[in-house]
Amino acid sequence: MAKYITIDLGASNGRVIVGNLHSFEVMNRFVTRNEMFHQEMYWDIPYIFSEIKKGLKEAFNQFGNEIVSIGIDSWGVDYGLLDSYGSLISLPYHYRDMRTANMMDEVHKKVAPVRLFQRTGISQNQINTIYQLAAMKQDRSSIFNAGAHYLSIADLLNYWLTGVMANEMTNASTTGLFDPVARQWAWDVIETLGFPKSLFGKLVSAGTILGPLTDTLQHELGASSDVKVVAVGSHDTASAVAAVPSDIDEIMYISSGTWSLLGTKIPKPIVSTEAHMSGFTNELAVDNTIRFLKNIMGMWIQQECIRYWESMGEAISWKELDRQTLEQSDFKGSINGNDKRYLLPNSHSSLMVDRIKDQCRERNLPVPTNKGQYMVAIYRGLAEAYVESVTHLRTISGLSFGAIHIIGGGCKNEILDQWTADSTGLPVYAGPAEATAFGNMVVQSVAMGQSESLGAARQMLLANQKVKLFRPSVN
Ligand code: LRH
């Protein structure tokens, strides 16, 4: 049976997976490394590419003849700029880099926020590509002016694999420079901001076959020219949503990972005042419908606390952390899971744990004093943010929703799954944890003619997925 290679890159870690709609194996798992140089935060993209190649080599070594295609999905909003020779000009900035701190105001002086939302459907978040490019144009003009091609992270890696440059639409739709109705770049916005139109290239839909690996890579990795690289739903959330294990149209999901993306799928963008004010965004799904969702801070807050404790020499075991969390479940401290103060990583002057303490104090709530209490404050804050977003989603979309599907790695957090069920009063279906990789595979299987349709491929997946139900507790 045909096998696919799925390269799934989240903002915390990446995986190279081989499999099909029945089963899969991980060939390489690695940290998607980033580094600070002189107060600037960059992705270590050469390292990420070399880990991808390691995984590919292993995959071809073990399953050579069975592999028909490769697809990459990655976190959104970040990008590489290439010069006119096709060379990467600088390491891609990390979306948490501080250079965008004041850029929303600068951009909104040129394009009013309401108009920007109406044109692009994208909620205004400082991490968006539009603000990153504006910051580069303003403060790093030597790099910006040398730029001839904008490529999202997945587009860049696809280019390095195949030599083909293309802008896959699910990722392009996260930039804040894309018109989700016309499914075209929002040229008027691009012009108003003084970005060269030539930077933005050919848009392709999820499922487009880009071509084989370059000759050099075929040789290096032991791959045949029959293996095709497919532009899948290259935005990780688009791939995750493509694998939500449900047949019904009115689905509500939380794609849970570094971020929590809570939303639904709708036929057309909603750009009402309510949608704008509530911070909902309209991103393209793999079937050209709209992922109407809200970005909530997610597991990042926890990840930064753990990173700090580990840097202090403490060994953190998940099992032990869960035990301590449950032991403290009556603790009443809680953060606001939507607060921007949690955006930036730990620094010597501002630790995540201190920001949590500050916010509990400001809210006149108990301040955490141990790890279990920190986790309770984070999970409670996320669950509260989910409740608020569920209410907004129902009002804005007019849909009612009978359950929540939590997908992605974060669904393994069973405490948060249960608290989400309890606080929203909705049953939670947790799983699959590898939804993103599966959604990536679903698109490849259709593109390669192995499945009739996305729906048929998803059906096949449904039969093979493990999903755990959490019912709301009755008090
Ligand atoms: C989730 C995600 C999200 C973006 C963020 C940068 O991984 O792609 O959709 O907003 O990362």
Image: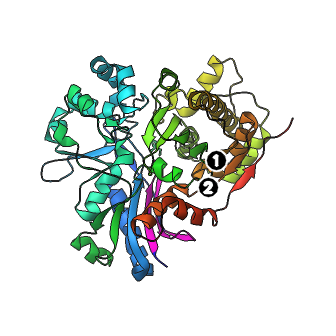
Taking the magenta stretch, the answer to whether it contains residue 179 is no
Local secondary structure at mark 1: strand
Q: Is residue 422 above or below residue 466?
A: above
Residue 257 percent coordinates (x, y): 55, 46
Picture quadrant of ligand 1? top left
Span of residues in magenta: 3-26
Q: Nearer the viewer, residue 383 or 464?
A: 464
Res 375 → quadrant: top right
Q: Does the rendering let one see residue 44?
A: no
Q: CA distance from mark 2 to mark 1?
A: 8 Å
Which label belongs to residue 245? 2
At x 49% / y 29%, what residue is drawn?
Answer: 350
Left or right: 269 in relation to 146: right
Give the camera-side residue of 147 and 282. Answer: 282
Residue at 55%, 61% (x, y): give it.
458
Confirm or reject: label 1 Cβ below 8 Å from ligand 1: no
Figure quadrant of residue 164: bottom left
Where residue 52 sits: x, y (%)? 38, 63
Q: How many other residues sit within 10 Å of disc 1, few (<14), some (14-19) or many (≥20)?
A: many
Residue 459: image x %, image y %? Answer: 59, 63
Residue type highlighted by circle 1: His
Looking at this rendering, what residue extends furthest in the bottom direction?
A: 65
Tag 2–tag 1 contact (CB < 8 Å): yes
Q: Which residue is mark 1?
A: 405
Report whether 436 appears left or right of 196.
right
Q: Secondary structure at mark 2?
A: loop
